[in-house]
Image (tube, helix red, strand yellow):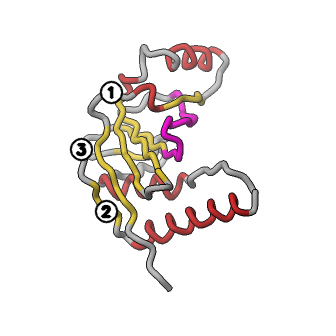
């Protein structure tokens, strides 16, 4: 089993707890159950945790020290339902936020894990023919055995 690491940086922790509180309020007042994590938050968190950089003018979310193009996706769904660009990246970092346990499981999936596999290949080709630049996927369908790289837990919310 992977050891759980802790996210201690205050701005990330404080923002996470406020997001979770907002989701609870939306459910309490029946303003919806759906919840989308803000990509500026999740992308910045991923770059911080893995020492990735933002490359100006790049269509990708990050770049690593080896100049690999990185796509970052974050979901609250254990299936990883999301949309993504059909542009070739080197690695996709999938951050699965479990809001019940306050854990973030982070998977690193290579481009090669997508290519040649259904339903990605079929949808990729279909979207390319239609001139679309995005594709809907369930990321858990493309994972191999060794792609979980870390599990993080947010530090507890401080009392006021």
Mark 2: which secondary structure?
strand
Mark nearer the viewer, 2 or 3: 3
Magenta run includes residue 83: yes
Q: Where is mark 2, residue-wise?
A: 6
Query: Which dot marks residue 144?
Result: 1
Name the spot of residue 25 as percent of width and height, x first. Answer: 67, 65
Which residue is painted at 40% across and 52% down in the image?
Answer: 104
Which residue is painted at 36% across and 52% down in the image?
Answer: 53
Query: Which dot marks residue 1?
Result: 3
Name the spot of residue 78 as percent of width and height, x first. Answer: 48, 40
Magenta run includes residue 107: no
Calculate the distance from the C-alpha at mark 2 to the C-alpha at mark 3. 16 Å
Mark 1: which secondary structure?
loop
N-term-proximal mark, 2 vs 3? 3
N-term-proximal mark, 3 vs 1? 3
Q: Do tag 1 and tag 2 residues touch (Cβ < 8 Å)?
A: no
Magenta residues?
Answer: 74-86
Name the spot of residue 136 as percent of width and height, x first. Answer: 59, 29
Image quadrant in which you'd find residue 70: top left
Q: Do tag 3 and tag 1 residues touch (Cβ < 8 Å)?
A: no
């Amino acid at each position: 089993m992977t050891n759980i690491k802790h996210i201690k940086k205050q701005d990330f922790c404080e923002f996470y707890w406020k997001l979770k509180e907002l989701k609870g309020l939306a459910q309490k007042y029946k303003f919806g159950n759906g919840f989308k994590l803000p990509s500026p938050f999740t992308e910045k968190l991923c770059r911080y945790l893995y020492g990735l950089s933002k490359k100006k003018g790049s269509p990708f979310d990050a770049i690593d020290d080896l100049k690999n193009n990185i796509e970052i996706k974050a979901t609250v769904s254990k299936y990883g339902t999301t949309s993504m660009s059909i542009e070739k990246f080197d690695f996709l970092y999938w951050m699965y936020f479990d809001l019940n346990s306050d854990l973030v499981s982070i998977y690193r999936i290579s481009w090669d894990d997508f290519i040649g596999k259904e339903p990605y290949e079929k949808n990729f080709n279909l979207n390319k023919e239609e001139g679309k630049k995005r594709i809907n996927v369930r990321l858990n369908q493309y994972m191999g055995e060794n792609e979980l790289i870390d599990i993080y837990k947010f530090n507890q919310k401080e009392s006021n």
